[in-house]
RNA sequence: GCCCCCAUCGUCUAGUGGCCUAGGACACCACCCUUUCAAGGUGGCGGCACGGGUUCGAAUCCCGUUGGGGGUGCCA
């Protein structure tokens, strides 16, 4: 029962566990939106469950009543579904809610108390601090251990940490040894009788017959405590695997307050689920070969916890965007058009909703698809087609029109377009010919036209959209630009 | 403070003692292509934290130093 390093129970847990069904779990607490770090942990669990024919158990750890918000639970389920962890998949089990198992947690705590492995303590936080200050040592000093306190209001139940040391066998980190002397007698039951995370988590894992606990590295210091609990409960501990945390540019753990960590937010911006999944999997692990962009099926086939890196990984928006761009370009055109639809018909689109023309967008889609990094960026590439006027970027406009011969090219193009054949190739050649007459290169020649029509200096190829806009509207915008040049800037 | 983890280009990584004058990707720079922007092509910049060992041989093994991170709650 003791957790000494020579104990048989902790010598090789995987040996025993391997004979049991593979059951993994993902146990988020519903205290906010879904965190990208959580998404990666879930994906790691999911990949293993899928390949090995195991079960992925979703357990919502909602025991912190003060912070628990029911609506976050659905958010977790939706976010999981988005990254491919589908509640209807045969490998999926749950969700279970930890709060519904409180009786079991308390019963387990009572068993520990009756067996003498836990005891009651009436020290308040202030008292603990005072004692710590006096002794010069931090934390609770186990001083209630042998006071033989009975259960009572305000009294917490503490686990009696045994002598010796605890060796955690971790799939990614190897053996990690903790001296039990450094582990204080931690709280199992609060003063109000409710169970704490450490206990609830273990009791649920035991009940749900979890064989592998794959979670973030921040839980590693909890692991010896939990392993002692497993053993105290007469159970063989699971296989542990602590994966490195995700960090920001300051190398700090990604936090909800400082960093952009909400999976939902990336989804709203038009990051594709496949891109997010693929990118997340490359943080701490890499597919074999020189390619990082690989389908989920390949990841499932090759992912191994033993290959996961030991050091934290920076969550790099630029690289995520690069992955997303690749995934967008690889989409069949129809899928791309369909994926863009929600963005183009949302409430926060810049044009009047009735002005949106899906046919026009479909025509422009191939030109846009190879340029955008996210789906939300599509709006900025086609807005000029659905707006009453070109969305003029004043700085870009002024700079472009100030260029030598820009105004002349614009004026002459207007004349030419009044009678030109209305076809992209003809329009293009007309514009370039005028430019050439002024000794202006193609890039310079199209610039004033582009800024007059689209309002910007960058965008999709110019002449195809002009054809679509029609002669009348094109001429109107071109003339309006000419007028604007004379007008004083606001 | 104490406990634990970690350490290859700016970033994500490949590398498990000789194939490494360290490979790929993102980012960045240059050139080519090009109606802008992208895309594509070519090339470039850039790294084994440091110091000791072990070994015929070390990015790879050991020890130490330094540096980072995590934990240290009647949160999860």
Image (cartoon, helix red, strand yellow):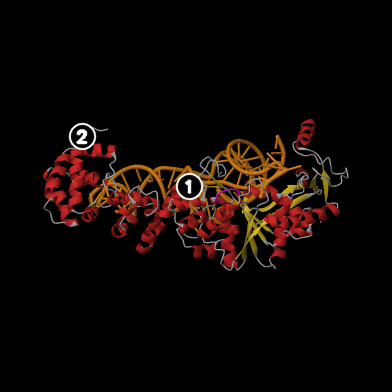
Q: Residue at x 38, y 61 (%)?
A: A338
Label 2, residues with CA under 10 Å away: few <14, some 14-19, many ≥20: few
Dot 2 falls on a residue whose secondary structure is: loop
What residue range appears in magenta? Answer: A30-34
Label 1, residues with CA under 10 Å away: few <14, some 14-19, many ≥20: some
Do tags 2 and 1 sit on the same chain? yes
Pointer 2 chain: A
Q: Name the dominant secondary structure of the magenta segment.
A: loop
Q: In the picture provided, is A6 more to the left or to the right than A216?
A: right
Quick check: can you spot residue A6?
Answer: no
Q: In the picture provided, is A52 more to the left or to the right than A476?
A: right
Image coords of residue B61 (percent x, y): 63, 51
A353 up-or-down from A481: above or below = below
Q: Verify whether residue A33 appears in magenta.
A: yes
For disc 2, the marked residue is: A487
Image coords of residue A9 (percent x, y): 77, 59
Quick check: can you spot residue A147?
Answer: yes
For disc 1, the marked residue is: A316
Pointer 1 chain: A
Q: Which badge, 2 or 1, is on the more N-terminal residue?
A: 1
Given residues A137 and A414, the one toward you in this image is A414
Q: Verify whether residue A430 appears in magenta.
A: no
Q: Residue at x 12, y 54 (%)?
A: A420
């Amino acid at each position: 029962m003791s957790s000494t390093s020579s104990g048989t129970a902790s010598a090789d847990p995987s040996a025993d566990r391997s004979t049991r069904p593979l059951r993994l779990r993902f146990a988020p607490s519903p205290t906010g939106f879904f965190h990208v770090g959580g998404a990666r942990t879930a994906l790691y669990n999911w990949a293993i469950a899928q390949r090995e024919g195991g079960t992925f158990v979703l357990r919502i750890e909602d025991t912190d009543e003060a912070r628990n918000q029911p609506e976050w639970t659905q958010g977790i389920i939706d976010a999981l579904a988005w990254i491919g962890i589908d509640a209807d998949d045969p490998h999926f089990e749950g969700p279970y809610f930890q709060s519904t198992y409180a009786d079991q947690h308390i019963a387990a705590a009572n068993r520990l108390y009756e067996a003498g492995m836990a005891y009651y303590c009436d020290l308040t936080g202030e008292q603990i601090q005072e004692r710590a200050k006096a002794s010069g040592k931090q934390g609770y000093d186990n001083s209630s251990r042998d006071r033989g306190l009975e259960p009572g209001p305000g009294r917490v139940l503490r686990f009696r940490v045994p002598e010796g040391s605890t060796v955690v066998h971790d799939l990614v980190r190897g053996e990690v040894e903790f001296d039990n002397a450094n582990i204080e007698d931690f709280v199992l039951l609060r003063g109000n009788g409710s169970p704490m995370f450490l206990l609830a988590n273990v009791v649920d894992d035991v009940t749900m017959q979890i064989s592998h606990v794959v979670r973030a590295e921040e839980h590693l210091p909890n692991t010896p405590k939990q392993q002692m609990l497993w053993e105290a409960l007469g159970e063989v501990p699971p296989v542990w695997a602590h994966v490195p945390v995700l960090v920001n540019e300051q190398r700090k753990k990604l936090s909800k307050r400082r960093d952009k960590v909400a999976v939902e937010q990336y989804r709203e911006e038009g990051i594709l689920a496949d891109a997010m999944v693929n990118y997340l999997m490359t943080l701490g692990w890499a597919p074999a070969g020189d390619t990082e962009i690989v389908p989920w099926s390949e990841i499932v086939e090759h992912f191994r916890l033993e290959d996961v890196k030991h050091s934290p990984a920076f969550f790099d928006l630029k690289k995520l965007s690069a992955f997303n761009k690749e995934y967008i370009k690889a989409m069949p055109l129809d899928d791309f058009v369909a994926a863009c639809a929600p963005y183009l018909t949302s409430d926060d689109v810049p044009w009047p909703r009735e002005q949106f023309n899906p046919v026009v967008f479909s025509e422009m889609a191939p030109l846009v698809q190879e340029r955008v990094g996210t789906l939300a960026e599509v709006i900025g590439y086609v807005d000029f087609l659905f707006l009453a006027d070109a969305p003029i970027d004043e700085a870009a406009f002024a700079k472009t029109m100030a260029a030598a011969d820009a105004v002349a090219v614009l004026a002459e193009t207007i004349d030419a377009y009044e009678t030109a054949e209305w076809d992209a190739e003809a329009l293009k050649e007309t514009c370039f010919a005028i430019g050439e007459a002024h000794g202006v290169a193609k890039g310079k020649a199209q610039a004033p036209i582009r800024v007059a029509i689209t309002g910007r200096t960058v965008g999709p190829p110019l002449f195809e959209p002009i054809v679509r806009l029609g002669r009348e509207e094109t001429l109107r915008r071109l003339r309006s630009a000419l007028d604007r040049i004379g007008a004083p800037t606001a």
